[in-house]
Amino acid sequence: MNYKGPSMYPTFLPGDGMTVIPYEGRKIRVGDVVVFTLPGQESFKVVHRVISIDSQGIRTKGDNSMTPDTEMLQEGDIIGRVVSVRRNKRDITIHGGTQGIMLARIRHAVKWSKSNTYKIIRPAYYRLLQRPPFRIPIHKLTRLVSFTYPEGKEMQLLIGPWVIGRHRSGWPQWQIRRPFRLFIDEASLPNKN
């Protein structure tokens, strides 16, 4: 199964290939990431983490969601547990139980920290963009590559294996990632694909 949607970010990214195994009599644990269907919507599959189990049923929540799911699940609603994902030709283990909960909380804290840190430094960053301290000549550290897609050409600016900028057909200007916008002289980049 392939994952799509934002509810389990950053544990899962859209396009991750999931390995799902049925429980087959094993106990469902709080912290497991499960694939389930909602009653009456059997063709629609959801991937969320188990956050509680009691006599009323199983409660789930997406790692990227602020509130638990409204529907209580029963064991029959659960297709199986996600044990790994395939991303960039790598298999990544998806932990369940207490370890899964702890890792999800750590990922969420890191995401929150990055977001709030950026909010704090954003004003200074935009002031620096208006008068950057220095610019790096692009030919020293970067590579420029071009790709042709059915919808047009795309140029990419790379530092090592990382794409730090893109320019697609029809775009008015380059899209340079933070913080590289501080150092790349966009006027020296080609604007026509």
Image (cartoon, rainbow, N blue to C red):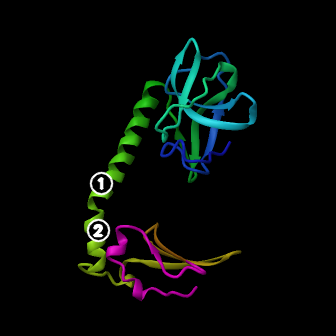
User: Where residue 1 sits: x, y (%)?
Assistant: 68, 42
As drawn, 159 above or below 85: below
Q: Which residue is mark 1?
A: 117
Residue type of the residue flagged with mark 2: Tyr
**Where residue 125 is drawn, which disc sits there?**
2
Q: Main secondary structure of the magenta part?
A: loop
Residue 70 is drawn in which quadrant?
Answer: top right
Q: Within the magenta stretch, is there residue 27?
A: no
SS of the residue at dot 1?
Answer: helix
Q: Callout 2 environment at 10 Å: few (<14), some (14 to 19), or many (20+)?
A: some
**In the rendered view of the protein, which quadrant contains the C terminus?**
bottom right
Residue type of the residue flagged with mark 1: Thr
User: Where residue 29 sits: x, y (%)?
Assistant: 53, 21
Q: Residue at x 32, y 48 (%)?
A: 113
As drawn, 85 above or below 41: below
Magenta residues span 168-193
